[in-house]
Every structure is written in C-alpha cells, then in structure tokens.
Image (tube, helix red, strand yellow):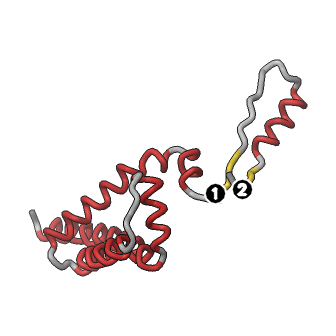
C-alpha cells in the first residue's frame, strides 16, 4: 500500500470508530439513566427478563467499551466486542426495524394506523372516505 492509501484507510477506520463509539456511548448512557427502558427493551426484543441491577452493569460495561472504541484503547478487544454487540443488536432488531407493525408494538405510545380494507365494488366517494379514514393516525394500543 502507498502512504496515500494508508491515510485513506486510517481515515475510514477513524470515521467508523467514531460513529460506532458515539452510537454505543449513547446507548450506555441510556442504560445508566433509564434502567427501566433497558428492561423493557430486553423483554420486547430479546424476550429476556433482566434481574435488578443488570441494566446498570450493562451500562457500565458498554460505557467502558464505547470509550475504548472512541479513544482507540485495547483495539483488538474493543473493536471485536463492539462488532459483536452491534451485530447482535442489528440481528435481533432487524425484523422490527423493517416492519412498522412490529416497531409500533415494541414502542409503547407509538402512533398507529388503522387498517381498512377497500373493496373494488365500492363507489369512488365511499372508497375515498375509507382511504382518508385509514390515513388518520391514532395514538395508543
């Protein structure tokens, strides 16, 4: 590799490290500030009930990991664990992230659309009213 391509690779890794570190840092701070949200996410996405104190421990561990990633400490360990954490998170939440209905079920109070079936035998004005009704957004379960 030339020195120019080395710089490009280094810059790319810096950008990846920075944004993944910020992403993990944000979630670790949430675990420390709102442990109840962590418990709710664990139940909703992972189908796991966390014992008391676990969200705080996970938050501290993720905080150390994200700071290690941001500042380049213990690169082999921090890069590998960050990749593992992010991969598991994406794999578990992929279906919910791509399906609006699942996402609405996972987030309490999220806006919901009513589902209305429209038959082709209806007259246009009736069909139009039903379409408008289906587009209204309601909040709640």
Q: In this view of the protein, which residue sits in the foreground, 10 or 135?
A: 135
Q: Residue at x 49, y 46 (%)?
A: 98
Judging by the rendered image, the residue that carries numbered circle 2 is 139
At which x and y percent is residue 3? Answer: 12, 70
Q: Secondary structure at mark 1?
A: loop
Q: Earlier in the sequence, mark 1 or mark 2?
A: 1
Q: Residue at x 22, y 67 (%)?
A: 8
At which x and y percent is residue 84? Answer: 25, 59
Q: Residue at x 75, y 45 (%)?
A: 135
Q: Residues within 10 Å of mark 2 (few under 14, many from 20)?
A: few
Q: Quadrant of the N terminus?
A: bottom left
- Judged from this view, the residue extending furthest toward the front is 51
- Is residue 39 in sight in this rendering? yes
Q: Is residue 140 above or below residue 76?
A: above
78 horizontally vs 31: left or right: left
Please say if the residues under marks 1 and 2 sit with CB atoms less than 8 Å apart.
yes
Q: In this view of the protein, which residue sits in the foreground, 5 or 106?
A: 106
Q: CA distance from mark 1 to mark 2?
A: 6 Å
Q: In this view of the protein, which residue sits in the foreground, 9 or 46?
A: 46
Q: Residues within 10 Å of mark 1 (few under 14, many from 20)?
A: some
At which x and y percent is residue 102? Answer: 54, 46
- Is residue 23 in sight in this rendering? no
Judging by the rendered image, the residue that carries numbered circle 1 is 110
Q: Is residue 109 above or below residue 10?
A: above
Q: Secondary structure at mark 2?
A: strand
Q: Which mark is residue 42?
A: none
- Judged from this view, the residue extending furthest toward the top is 121
At which x and y percent is residue 80? Answer: 19, 63
Q: In this view of the protein, which residue sits in the foreground, 50 or 87?
A: 50
107 horizontally vs 39: left or right: right
**Location of residue 111 (image quadrant):** bottom right
């Amino acid at each position: 590799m030339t020195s120019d391509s080395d710089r490009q690779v280094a810059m790319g890794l810096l950008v990846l490290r920075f944004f993944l570190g910020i992403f993990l840092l944000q979630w670790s701070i949430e675990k420390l500030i709102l442990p109840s949200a962590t418990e709710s996410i664990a139940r909703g996405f992972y189908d796991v009930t966390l014992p008391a104190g676990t969200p705080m421990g996970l938050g501290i561990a993720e905080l150390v990991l994200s700071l290690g990633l941001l500042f380049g400490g213990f690169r082999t360990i921090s890069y590998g664990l960050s990749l593992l954490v992010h991969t598991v998170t994406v794999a578990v939440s992929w279906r919910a992230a791509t399906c609006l209905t699942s996402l609405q079920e996972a987030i309490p109070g999220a806006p919901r659309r009513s589902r209305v079936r429209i038959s082709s035998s209806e007259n246009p004005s009736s069909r139009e009213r039903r379409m408008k009704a289906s587009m209204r957004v309601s909040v709640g379960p």
